[in-house]
Amino acid sequence: MRIDPKGTVAGRPALLVRQTLRHLRTRLPWGLSELESAASVEAGEGRALIKALSAEGLIEAAGRNAWKVTQAGQTLSSATAAKRVTRATAQRALHQFLGRVEQVNNDPYFLGKVTRVVLFGSMLKPAVERLSDVDLAIEVASKDADFDRARVKNYERAEELATRGHRFLNFLEQEGCWYWEVFRFLKGQSRVIALADYSVEKTLVLTVPHRFLIGQPEQVAVQSAPGTPEPRARKRLPRDCPF
């Protein structure tokens, strides 16, 4: 997904909205003060922004005075504002990305492994020569199948990063340290790669043209609309029944 860097979303600068959603997407839930801090607005100005983002379907209520970023908001938070690139440049960026995937999966330093990579978006349209970006959704799983052992390793890694000066925004980012370390490495500061979480974007990704590059393909489960229940046959009572 590409956004116009000079455009607006919900009546606000598009880049400001994207930055705000990026800060908030890992927090569940968050409140007014966190929104104002993420958007760099004065105290009291956040309520109007919440109303605007909610009207656009980018956030939704998650309790009393609490909100969360919706799937549409997650998509926008991963959008690029970079200039369009040639298909050759996009292919090169994709090749480099898959090389980073291989490195993550083979390097014991990383606590997570990439189990799915799905390509979607404009790169699958042969008629489009200049692309906005390379849209990819990834699924990352822990390399250690033992939950408790994996959690201990994650805490150790979080402490290690903290001693190097890394500041975690919140408890959830610390808990998901192993995941975000992989995610950021795969992104590789590339302005061409637009990376999304497969588990979050799954419904969107599987309902548009897509291609599984790594992992077992899936399909969206279609739920049939509930039909009108058939009337149950009435049990005939004996003639001598008093009721």
Image (spheres, grey):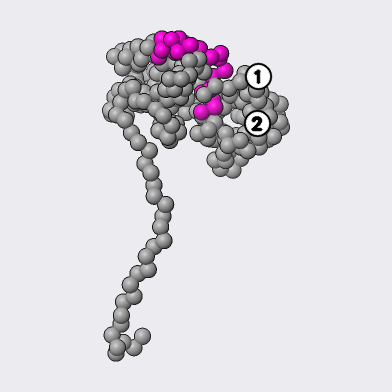
In this rendering, position of residue 22 left or right of residue 214: right
In this rendering, position of residue 104 left or right of residue 67: left
Q: Quadrant of the C terminus?
A: bottom left
Relative to residue 33, is residue 111 depicted above or below? above
Residue 2: percent from left, percent from top: 54, 21
Q: Which mark is residue 6?
A: 1
Quarter-of-image position of residue 76: top right
Q: Residue at x 65, y 22 (%)?
A: 7
Q: Residue at x 68, y 29 (%)?
A: 11
**SS state under label 2:** loop
Q: Residue at x 42, y 22 (%)?
A: 124
Residue 173: percent from left, percent from top: 47, 25
Quarter-of-image position of residue 236: bottom left
Residue 138: percent from left, percent from top: 39, 24
Boundaries of the magenta span: 75-94
Residue type highlighted by circle 2: Ala
Magenta region includes residue 78: yes
**Residue 79 shows up from this direction:** yes
Q: Residues within 10 Å of mark 1 (few under 14, many from 20)?
A: few
Q: Which mark is residue 10?
A: 2
Magenta region includes residue 34: no
60 and 98: which is toward the camera: 98
**SS state under label 1:** loop
Residue type highlighted by circle 1: Lys
